[in-house]
Amino acid sequence: MGLEENDVSAVQESWKIAKSVAKLRDHGIAFFELLFTEHPSWRTEFFSHLGDAPMEDLKKTPKFRAHSTLVMSNLDSWVKNLDELDMVVASVQKLGQNHAARGIMSAQFATIGEVVLLYLKAGLKDQFTEEMEVGWTKLLDTVVAIIKENNEEGDE
């Protein structure tokens, strides 16, 4: 991973701030609400298994809440374990493999990364420093690179 010590510190500090204001489940739900606002077609393209209920109703369903929590739990694990890069890489590889069957590949993870940055910027406001943005960008770009390398070799 291309993260330096200062990047790791910035990512972990921003994540600590984010977690201090809401539970992972609540962050997950709000993240998906932003994702579906930014990319409305994703709701039917990648999440049709959740049904077509209005967002307010979807947010109350156990399946959606569980998935939202799982996404944030994965992110939480990666951030906590940036000192154990081999473990983070293995987790990202498994995540990429699990999502490839549904057509969620590196390009979609790049889009998700963009929305993660938007979400953090909106939530942390002035507390989200340039160093934090650089660290998160490096982390999210690395996630995409791992998924691309692991799932899409030769697919170009």
Image (cartoon, rainbow, N blue to C red):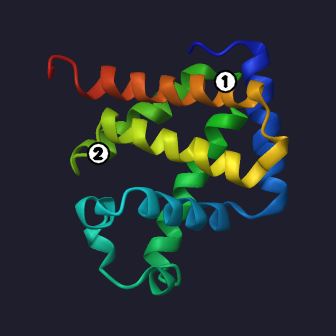
Dot 1 surroundings within 10 Å: few (below 14), some, or many (20 or more)? some
In the rendered image, the quadrant that contains the C terminus is: top left
> Helix, strand or loop at disc 1?
helix
106 or 40, which lies in front? Answer: 40
Residue shown at 45%/81% (left/top)?
A: 58
Residue 10, x across and y down, in percent: 78, 28
What residue is at 78 percent from the left and 39 percent from the top?
A: 128
Judging depth in this view, the residue of 6 and 128 nearest the camera is 128
Q: In x, y percent, where is residue 41?
A: 28, 61
- In-image side of 117 versus 48 (left or right): right
Query: Residue furthest toward the left?
Result: 155
Label 2 sits on residue: 104
Q: Residues within 10 Å of mark 2 (few under 14, many from 20)?
A: some
Residue wearing tag 1: 134
Q: Amino acid at mark 1?
A: Val
| Residue 83 horizontal side relative to residue 17, left or right | left
Which residue type carries mark 2?
Ile
For the residue pair 104 and 115, the one nearer the viewer reads as 115
Q: Quadrant of residue 52?
A: bottom left
Please report contact status of discs 1 and 2: CB closer than 8 Å, yes or no.
Answer: no
